[in-house]
Image: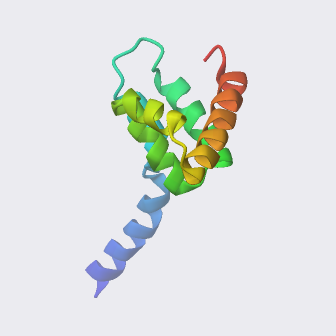
């Protein structure tokens, strides 16, 4: 019983000392996979934080696919589908905001 209490007490003390693992959002993850000098951790984290404020989680996942395949972005931009047009407007607003907020990182 004493060993159990000691282990529980150590667990309670040790948990706050462990580093918190922040999970990267889909935009940050896609950005970090880019093979570009500008794709620094700070820049990718900044762009992801703007995405979290301007796009839904689903839209973030969709936008992240553009990093892997830029042709998808072109296809959405040129689409005549109303949903694609609405998404593209929000995506452009996200891009403009990210450019302003994250410039120089």
Query: Hey, which residue is sitting farthest front in the picture?
Result: 80
Q: Is residue 24 visible?
A: no
Residue 15: image location, x then y, percent: 44, 61
- Looking at the picture, does residue 36 appear above or below residue 11? above
Residue 92: image location, x then y, percent: 64, 33
Query: Hey, which residue is sitting farthest bottom in the picture?
Result: 1
Residue at 44% over, 49% down: 23
The one of 83 and 19 positioned closer to us in this rendering:
83
Count of picture labels: 0
The one of 90 and 57 positioned closer to us in this rendering:
90
- Looking at the picture, does residue 7 appear above or below residue 54? below
The N terminus - image quarter: bottom left
Colour setting: rainbow
100 left or right, relative to 43: right
41 left or right, relative to 52: left
- Looking at the picture, does residue 86 appear above or below residue 75? below
The one of 92 and 19 positioned closer to us in this rendering:
92
Q: Is residue 46 visible?
A: yes
The one of 77 and 41 positioned closer to us in this rendering:
77
Residue 105: image location, x then y, percent: 60, 18
Residue 21: image location, x then y, percent: 43, 49
93 left or right, relative to 34: right
Q: Which picture quadrant has residue 68?
A: top left
Residue at 50% over, 29% down: 44
């Amino acid at each position: 019983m004493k060993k159990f209490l000691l282990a529980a007490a150590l667990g309670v003390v040790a948990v706050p000392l462990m580093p918190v693992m922040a999970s990267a959002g889909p935009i940050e993850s896609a950005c970090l996979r880019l093979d570009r000098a500008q794709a620094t951790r700070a820049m990718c984290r900044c762009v992801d934080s703007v995405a979290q404020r301007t796009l839904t989680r689903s839209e973030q996942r969709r936008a992240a696919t553009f990093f892997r395949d830029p042709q998808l972005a072109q296809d959405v931009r040129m689409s005549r589908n109303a949903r694609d047009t609405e998404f593209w407007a929000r995506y452009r607003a996200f891009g403009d905001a990210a450019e302003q907020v994250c410039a120089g990182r």
